[in-house]
Image: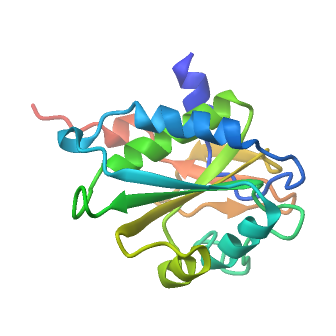
Amino acid sequence: MLERIVFKNRSYRRFHEKEKISSNLLKDLINLARLTPSTANLQPLKYIISFESKTNALIFPCLRWAGYLKDWEGPEDGQRPSAYIVILNDKNICENTTIDQGIAAQSILLGAVEAELGGCIIASIDRDLLRKELKIDDQYQILLVLALGKPRERVMLENIKDGDVRYWRDKNAVHHVPKRPLDEILVDIG
């Protein structure tokens, strides 16, 4: 059921790094994104896949991992993603996309959950460094990086308390994510 997959689709930031992801599976995940709706059906998104240690090592330092966890600089060796997907906008097709990358990223991550993987959508990126490291042509706007792998952490959803949306980790390294209740996000218009 879709609800189960959505519930399991958390932002995982620690992985079993040695559990590799094949290029074929990454291509299958990108194919899910290819099949999703696109604004005006322009389909401007392009993708870079990385599943080899050497390229992954170039991508990792370009990413900022968890803004609310001030004392954590990201996953340690052995806990880093096994693969990445870099989502690009081809400016020769469309100068600026607004929602396509969100639809594509969610489709990819839902497919990853179905494949017993997890991931994290990362928008906090040193784009200049990533462009340099991967030799990304200026024709492409760097939109998002998806970190993928076999999750190595437990993520718990809980009700929001006192309006605080910040996620946090407890002493057992369980990652807690506050969510607003359904009745708080529904707007009554009459």
Q: Position of residue 28 (x, y in %)?
A: 59, 33
94 relative to 150 in the view: left or right:
left
Total of numbered circles in the picture?
0
Quarter of the image for residue 133 reads bottom right
Taking depth in this image into account, of 123 and 186 the one nearest to the observer is: 123
Taking depth in this image into account, of 149 and 182 the one nearest to the observer is: 149
Rendering colour mode: rainbow
Residue depicted at 31% across the width and 51% down the height: 44
- 87 versus 67 height, above or below: above
Q: Position of residue 6 (x, y in %)?
A: 55, 32
Taking depth in this image into account, of 54 and 62 the one nearest to the observer is: 54
Quarter of the image for residue 72 reads bottom right
Q: Position of residue 109 (x, y in %)?
A: 57, 41
Q: Position of residue 66 (x, y in %)?
A: 62, 69
Q: Quadrant of the N terminus?
A: top right
Residue depicted at 50% across the width and 34% down the height: 31
Name the residue furthest left: 190
Residue depicted at 63% across the width and 43% down the height: 157
188 relative to 186 in the view: left or right:
left
Residue depicted at 66% across the width and 71% down the height: 59
Q: Quadrant of the C terminus?
A: top left
- 33 versus 135 height, above or below: above
